[in-house]
């Protein structure tokens, strides 16, 4: 079972989004768990995000994050994309994470994240 801690929901909208996601998951009989972490991500172009952690299937995670953006008119970060490259860097957590940003269900830009002291920080960001 996959898991991640670098998906994001617009700051201040996490509780509503998590409630909607859990209702959607239950209604569709999927196995998926999601919760808000204490970590935040600050961006210049897209605002601030509360990071969430989840356990389940990647396709379900990406689907519910994008659906919550369109249904609730919020901004979300869909992470989990990696550039093919050095396996050693990926193993030691030195690789970068590529993310898509959605606002109201529409793709609005990309982020490149890296780890610093165990937390995710924005390395680069670009509007679509």
Image (tube, helix red, strand yellow):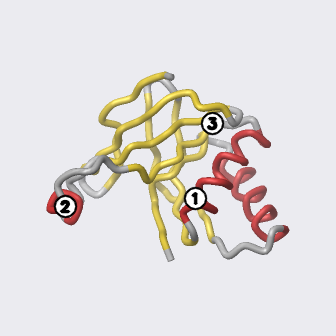
Residue 75: mark: 3
The image shows residue 16 at horizontal and vertical percentages of: 75, 51
- Seen at 54% across and 36% down, the residue is 101
* Crowd around label 1: few <14 · some 14–19 · many ≥20 (10 Å): some
Of pointers 2 and 1, the one earlier in the residue sequence? 1
Cβ–Cβ below 8 Å for labels 3 and 1?
no
> Position of 63 compared to 124: left or right?
right
Q: Position of residue 29 (x, y in %)?
A: 79, 74
Q: Which residue is mark 1?
A: 36
The mark nearer the N terminus, 3 or 2, is: 3
Q: CA distance from mark 2 to mark 1?
A: 30 Å
- Determine whether the residue tagged by mark 3 lies in a helix, strand or loop: strand
Q: Is residue 29 above or below residue 83?
A: below
Residue 69: x and y in percent read 69, 41
Mark 3, other Cα within 10 Å: few <14 / some 14–19 / many ≥20 = many
Q: Nearer the viewer, residue 43 or 91?
A: 91
In which image quadrant can residue 110 be found?
A: top left
The residue positioned 75% from the left and 35% from the top of the image is 73
Q: Which residue is mark 2?
A: 87
Q: Secondary structure at mark 1?
A: strand
Q: In the image, is residue 55 above or below residue 103?
A: below
Instruction: Provide the secondary structure element on which disc 2 rests.
Output: helix
Residues at circles 3 and 2 in contact by the CB criterion of under 8 Å:
no
Q: Nearer the viewer, residue 12 or 78?
A: 78
Query: What residue sits 56% from the left and 27% below the top?
Result: 108
């Amino acid at each position: 079972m996959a898991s991640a801690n670098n998906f994001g929901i617009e700051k201040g909208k996490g509780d509503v989004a998590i409630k909607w996601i859990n209702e959607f998951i239950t209604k569709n009989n999927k196995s998926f768990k999601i919760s808000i972490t204490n970590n935040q991500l600050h961006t210049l172009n897209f605002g601030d995000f509360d990071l969430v952690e989840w356990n389940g299937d990647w396709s379900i995670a990406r689907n519910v994050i994008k659906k919550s953006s369109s249904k609730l008119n919020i901004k979300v970060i869909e992470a989990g994309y990696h550039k093919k490259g050095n396996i050693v860097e990926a193993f030691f957590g030195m690789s970068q994470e590529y993310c898509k940003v959605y606002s109201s269900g529409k793709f609005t830009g990309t982020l490149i994240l890296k780890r610093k002291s165990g937390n995710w920080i924005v390395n680069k960001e670009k509007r679509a």
